Image: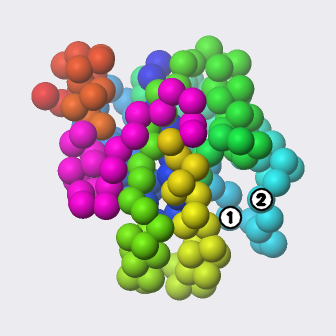
Amino acid sequence: MRVLVITGAPGVGKTHVAQRMVSCYRVPVAVVDCDPFVHPWESGEPLHRLMAAELGARVPVYQEWGARVIVVHGVILAGGRTYEPVLEVLRALGTTPVVYGLRAGPAVLAERIRQDQSAPHLVAGRLALTHLDEDVPAVPGIRLIETAHRDEQAVVTEIARQELAELGPGWLVG
């Protein structure tokens, strides 16, 4: 099974890219959002453990269903954040995740967040986290993709190109 982790700061396009990746594969695909909707939202070790535990419960169900690819997305960053517990869970499940990091720069992220009308109640919280864009390159083994001057489809095409080169046409639409 192939596990892709798509990470980056809020506003970089993780959710839309993950959802569009589904159409790139010829095999069954599942998409898992690791960013929880909890209130009050406070980042910290308990929340990171919750995210990892939820992922650990969902991946085996998707495997049983027949998923050959699981696309995991969220603010999954290293340095005492979510990255370590999430990767620990994925490795314990026998997978070797491939991590794609999307970056755009804090100014571009802020503009995208302000233009996103889908969740106006989350704008302030998302804006407060744009500085996380600077942490993306620190994720071990990350495959960085700059998104500031690319639309979502161009980002999907780049990830699909890399996946096709690694997995071959039997996995992806050519």
In the figure, is residue 49 to the left or right of 91? right
The residue carrying pointer 2 sits among few (fewer than 14), some (14 to 19) or many (20 or more) residues within 10 Å by Cα, namely few
Q: Which mark is residue 43?
A: 2
Mark 2 residue type: Ser
Q: Position of residue 133 (x, y in %)?
A: 52, 57
Magenta run includes residue 21:
no
Q: Which mark is residue 37?
A: 1
Query: Looking at the rendering, in which quadrant would you find the C terminus?
Result: top left
Image quarter of residue 130: bottom right
Which label lies toward us, 2 or 1? 2
In the figure, is residue 25 to the left or right of 45? left
Name the residue at 77% across, 59% down: 43
Q: Is residue 4 above or below residue 39?
A: above
For this rendering, which residue is in front, 12 or 121? Answer: 12
Q: Position of residue 139 (x, y in %)?
A: 57, 37
Highlighted magenta segment, given as a residue range:
138-158
Query: Can residue 67 be seen from the camera position used here?
Result: no
Q: Is residue 93 above or below residue 10?
A: above
Magenta run includes residue 147:
yes
The residue carrying pointer 1 sits among few (fewer than 14), some (14 to 19) or many (20 or more) residues within 10 Å by Cα, namely few
Mark 1 residue type: Phe
